[in-house]
Amino acid sequence: MNNTIIWMIIGMGLVTYIPRMLPLVVFQRVKLPAFWQGVLKNVPYATLGALIIPGIFLINDDVWFGILGLISAFVSAWLGANVIVVVLVSVMVLSVYALFV
């Protein structure tokens, strides 16, 4: 392997590692207010919604597929499930729906 490629891999690793690690080191002892903790706690759900909602409007064949996925994701998130659980619940619901259609 070429030395340039190795240095590129090391550089890309540092570029992605530093922004992730820096807040943990700098803000390790800082206690955020309850409002900001709530905001940051809901970022994954907002991101998931930003990924799911446009896809629902782009479905051409079976609109119910998108509607059921949205409803199952919304209900599981409303009940307080983890983001991974929300995605898995939606996948399971849509898998069962696809078996019967």
Image: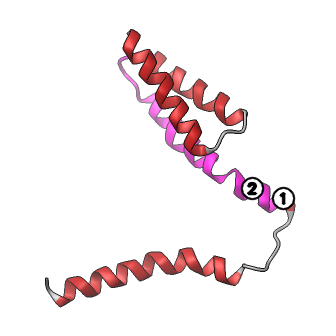
Q: Quadrant of residue 7?
A: bottom left
User: What amino acid type is highlighted by mark number 1?
Assistant: Phe
Q: Nearer the viewer, residue 54 or 36?
A: 36
For the C terminus, give its image quadrant: top left
The correct choice, above or below, for 49 with respect to 16 in the image is above
The correct choice, above or below, for 40 with respect to 17 in the image is above
Query: Residue tagged by mark 1?
Result: 35
User: What amino acid type is highlighted by mark number 2?
Assistant: Val
Q: Quadrant of residue 96?
A: top left
Give the extent of the magenta segment.
35-63
In the image, which disc is placed on residue 39? 2
The correct choice, above or below, for 94 with respect to 44 in the image is above
For the N terminus, give its image quadrant: bottom left
x, y percent for residue 22: 60, 81
Horizontal side, residue 34 vs residue 55: left or right: right
Q: Which residue appears at 49% of the width and 36% of the height?
A: 54
Q: Secondary structure at mark 1?
A: helix
Check residue 59 for magenta coloring.
yes
Q: Which residue appears at 37% of the width and 21% of the height?
A: 60
Q: Which residue appears at 78% of the width and 80% of the height?
A: 29
**Label 1 with label 2: CB-CB less than 8 Å:** yes
x, y percent for residue 20: 55, 74
Q: Nearer the viewer, residue 64 or 54?
A: 64
Residue placed furthest toward the top: 100
The chief SS type of the magenta part is: helix
Check residue 21 for magenta coloring.
no
| Gap between marks 1 and 2 measured at Cα | 6 Å
Q: Residues within 10 Å of mark 1 (few under 14, many from 20)?
A: few
Q: Residues within 10 Å of mark 2 (few under 14, many from 20)?
A: few
